[in-house]
Structures are given as structure tokens and as C-alpha cells.
Image (cartoon, rainbow, N blue to C red):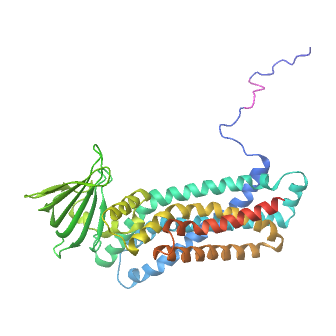
């Protein structure tokens, strides 16, 4: 047998496989076609959002002498709030233009003629849509609430020369360390005395829920001091097992890291400054204490949208794939028009559904998911017909 000396030596080193998985040629080609328009649409949407907010801030910057870096901080921290809208639009725009170009040049037809199924062609864009939806959810869950509160504080610092937000009635605060939820109906003008205070203490080591109520309370350092508090203990079956009235003052620690100034801020009364876990706990607390109404339904809609909004990115990919193949030969202009029409159509359905959800006509959770259900079903039918 013939041998070749030197094979396997450093002169003829074997090629090492890369540590990352390589895309197939088809998948890489399709993804590159979609990635460019997606990135452009995402950047354009955030730029439009930034410009729209800048119009509001320009008056304070020019006419009221607000510091430039304070205005800039307000604008930058407001940007993550656009994430639930930006990612679905970018997915819709990118997929329509990318696949529209492939369809216009008959590349989709060539792939299918060579035996590649439509599902195989669109497999990676669909997986990319799921990945974008996950990224959108994580940003909206972990970054947007914190950034929104910082932006709101910056705005009130511009407006009132103070980072403390104006105090409003019906203040809710939750302590993530203990799970305690605080409700205050009103605050006196001195900013320390409070009226009609409730503190919900969830079951932790024992299967009992405790609700503390007091007509008056005050802030003392890092504690809230309840005067003549009534302590109601509820067992695991939801029945009241004990009611105690404290003769002296009762001290409860404020949420971790809070002082009186921060605790009495209404920032946490804004549902957009809460993540889904915090908002769900507040809704649960309000239901258990009998605080319903349209405001509660609105919070339930907001909680559901924290999941349905990001998922709209995947729905946008599903809807745009068959539309791009069907209408792509008519040029990119039609793709842009379809993107804009589809975007506003989706959010028109969303606005109508959530309006019914807030007034109790339909279930709030179903109202938030209804646009995804309608557009997702239509997209599924179109993809199935296109595959045939």
C-alpha cells in the first residue's frame, strides 16, 4: 500500500472543527437576506421613538434651561420601553423584504423545484423569530421596568427639580425580599403621615396569610410605624382564624433599600416599572383585599401583554413569510407598505381587544392574546396553503 510521508505531521495539520455550530449553506443564505432589513427596521424604529420623545424634551432643554445630560438621561432610559413594539415590527419588515427579494428573483421557486419543501426553507426564520421573542421578553422583563422608573425620575427632576415623584393616593409597593405588599390610600402634606394603610404578608414558614391594617401610620427611618394596627390571620382554606388589635405601635421594615422618600414615591404605582412577577403579586393582593374595578382589569391586561407583546415577534415572522412569497414579485415597495399596514392592523386589533378587556366585556388575559391568536391562525393557514 502506498504511503505518503509527512501526512498528519505539523506540515499537514488536520483542520480543527470550530467551537460554534456552522449553519448550512441554505440557512445561512436565507438568514443573511432577512438580517439586513431586520437590523435596519429595528434601528429606524428606535430612532423614530427617540425623536418622538425628544420633541417633548426639547421645550425643557431650550426654553426652561434643563441640563443637557439630564434630558439625555431621560431619553436614553426611555428607549427600552419601545422594545415590545420595535421587535415585532422589525421581524415583519425584515422577513417581508428578505423573502420578498428571494421571491422576486425566483429563488424560492428554484429551491422548491430542486426538492426543498417550503417548511424547510422557512425553518430557520421561524426559529429566529422565537429567539427574537425570547430576547424581547427578557429586555421587557428585566431592563425596561428599571429604565422606565429611572427615566420617570429624570423627567420629574427636570420638571420639579427633584428626583422624588409626586405622591399620589392608592400607592402600592412590594418588598421582593420578604414578599410583603404595602398599600397606602393617602399621604399627608408633610410627606410622612399616612392614612388607611394595609400590609399583606404572604405565607412563608407557616400556611397562614396575615393582613395588617391601620387608620394611621408614619415613616420612621427605615420602618413604617402602624398606630393601633389590626392583624387578621387567614388560614390555608381562606378562612379568618384570628383577629388581633395591637395596643401599642407596630413597626414593619420598609422594602429593602428604601427610605421614607423612596417609599412614598409613586413610581411603583406605574405598572410599566414592574416586572411580571411584581405586577402579578400586586394583582393578587388587590383581589384578596377586595379592591377590584376597571383599574384592576387594566393591570391584568398589562400583565398579559408582558407575555403577548414579545410573542408578537414570532407571529410577525409567521405572517410575513407567506405574504412575502405571494407578493414579493411586485417589488420591495409593496413589502414596505405591507409592513406598515400589517403593523398598524395588528395594533388596531390589540387596542380594540384591550379596551374590551379593561371594561370587563371579555377576559383581560384573552384580550391581550386575541391579536396573536387571530393573526397566528391566519398565518398558519397561509403557510399551510403555500406549502401545498
Horizontal arrangement in the rendering, residue 272 relative to residue 232 (left or right): right
Q: In the image, is residue 197 above or below residue 132?
A: below
Q: Position of residue 55 (x, y in %)?
A: 48, 81
| Residue 189 lies in quadrant | bottom left
Tell me what residue is drawn at x 49 percent, y 62 percent.
306
Looking at the image, the residue that sits furthest to the bottom is: 63
Q: Position of residue 91 (x, y in %)?
A: 65, 64
Whether residue 98 is visible here, answered yes or no, is no
The magenta region covers 10-15
Tell me what residue is drawn at x 84 percent, y 70 percent.
329
Q: Position of residue 292 (x, y in %)?
A: 36, 70
Q: Which one is nearer the viewer's eye here, 269 or 24?
A: 269
| Residue 172 lies in quadrant | bottom left
Tell me what residue is drawn at x 20 percent, y 69 percent.
196
Horizontal arrangement in the rendering, residue 340 relative to residue 277 (left or right): right
- Residue 11 is covered by the magenta coloring: yes
Q: Position of residue 262 (x, y in %)?
A: 26, 64
Q: Main secondary structure of the magenta part?
A: loop
From the image, which quarter does the N terminus lie in? top right
From the image, which quarter does the C terminus lie in? bottom right
Q: Which one is nearer the viewer's eye here, 203 or 3?
A: 203
Tell me what residue is drawn at x 77 percent, y 25 percent.
11
- Residue 268 is covered by the magenta coloring: no
| Residue 244 lies in quadrant | bottom left
Callout count = 0
Q: Which one is nearer the viewer's eye here, 66 or 44?
A: 44
Looking at the image, the residue that sits furthest to the left is: 247
Looking at the image, the residue that sits furthest to the top is: 1
Amino acid at each position: 500500500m502506498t504511503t505518503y510521508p509527512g501526512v498528519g505531521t505539523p506540515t499537514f495539520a488536520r483542520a480543527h472543527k470550530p467551537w460554534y455550530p456552522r449553519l448550512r449553506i441554505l440557512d445561512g443564505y436565507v438568514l443573511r437576506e432577512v438580517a439586513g432589513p431586520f437590523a435596519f427596521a429595528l434601528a429606524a424604529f428606535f430612532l423614530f421613538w427617540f425623536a418622538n420623545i425628544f420633541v417633548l424634551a426639547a421645550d425643557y432643554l431650550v426654553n426652561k434651561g434643563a441640563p443637557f445630560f439630564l434630558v439625555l438621561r431621560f431619553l436614553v432610559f426611555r428607549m427600552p420601553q419601545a422594545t415590545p413594539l420595535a421587535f415585532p415590527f422589525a421581524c415583519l419588515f425584515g422577513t417581508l423584504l428578505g423573502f420578498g427579494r428571494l421571491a422576486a428573483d425566483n429563488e424560492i421557486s428554484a429551491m422548491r423545484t430542486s426538492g426543498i419543501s417550503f417548511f424547510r426553507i422557512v425553518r430557520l426564520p421561524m426559529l429566529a423569530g422565537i429567539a427574537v421573542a425570547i430576547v424581547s421578553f427578557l429586555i421587557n422583563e428585566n431592563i425596561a421596568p428599571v429604565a422606565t422608573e429611572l427615566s420617570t425620575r429624570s423627567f420629574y427632576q427636570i420638571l420639579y427639580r427633584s428626583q422624588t415623584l409626586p405622591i399620589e393616593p392608592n400607592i402600592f409597593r412590594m418588598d421582593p425580599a420578604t414578599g410583603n405588599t404595602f398599600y397606602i390610600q393617602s399621604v399627608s402634606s408633610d410627606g410622612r403621615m399616612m392614612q388607611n394603610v394595609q400590609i399583606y404578608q404572604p405565607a412563608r414558614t407557616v400556611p397562614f396569610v396575615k393582613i395588617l391594617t391601620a387608620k394611621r401610620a408614619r415613616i420612621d427611618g427605615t420602618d413604617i410605624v402602624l398606630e393601633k394596627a389590626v392583624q387578621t390571620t387567614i388560614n390555608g382554606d381562606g378562612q379568618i382564624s384570628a383577629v388581633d388589635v395591637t395596643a401599642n405601635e407596630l413597626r414593619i421594615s420598609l422594602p429593602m433599600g428604601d427610605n421614607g422618600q423612596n417609599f412614598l414615591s409613586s413610581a411603583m404605582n406605574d405598572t410599566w416599572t414592574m416586572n411580571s412577577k411584581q405586577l402579578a403579586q400586586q394583582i393578587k393582593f388587590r383581589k384578596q383585599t377586595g379592591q377590584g374595578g376597571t383599574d384592576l382589569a387594566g393591570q391584568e391586561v398589562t400583565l398579559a401583554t408582558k407575555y403577548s407583546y414579545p410573542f408578537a415577534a414570532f407571529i410577525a415572522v409567521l405572517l410575513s413569510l407567506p405574504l412575502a412569497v405571494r407578493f414579493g414579485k411586485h417589488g420591495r415597495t409593496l413589502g414596505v407598505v405591507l409592513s406598515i399596514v400589517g403593523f398598524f392592523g395588528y395594533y388596531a386589533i390589540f387596542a380594540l381587544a384591550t379596551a374590551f378587556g379593561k371594561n370587563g366585556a371579555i377576559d383581560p388575559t384573552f384580550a391581550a392574546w386575541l391579536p396573536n391568536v387571530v393573526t397566528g391562525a391566519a398565518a398558519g393557514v397561509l403557510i399551510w396553503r403555500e406549502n401545498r
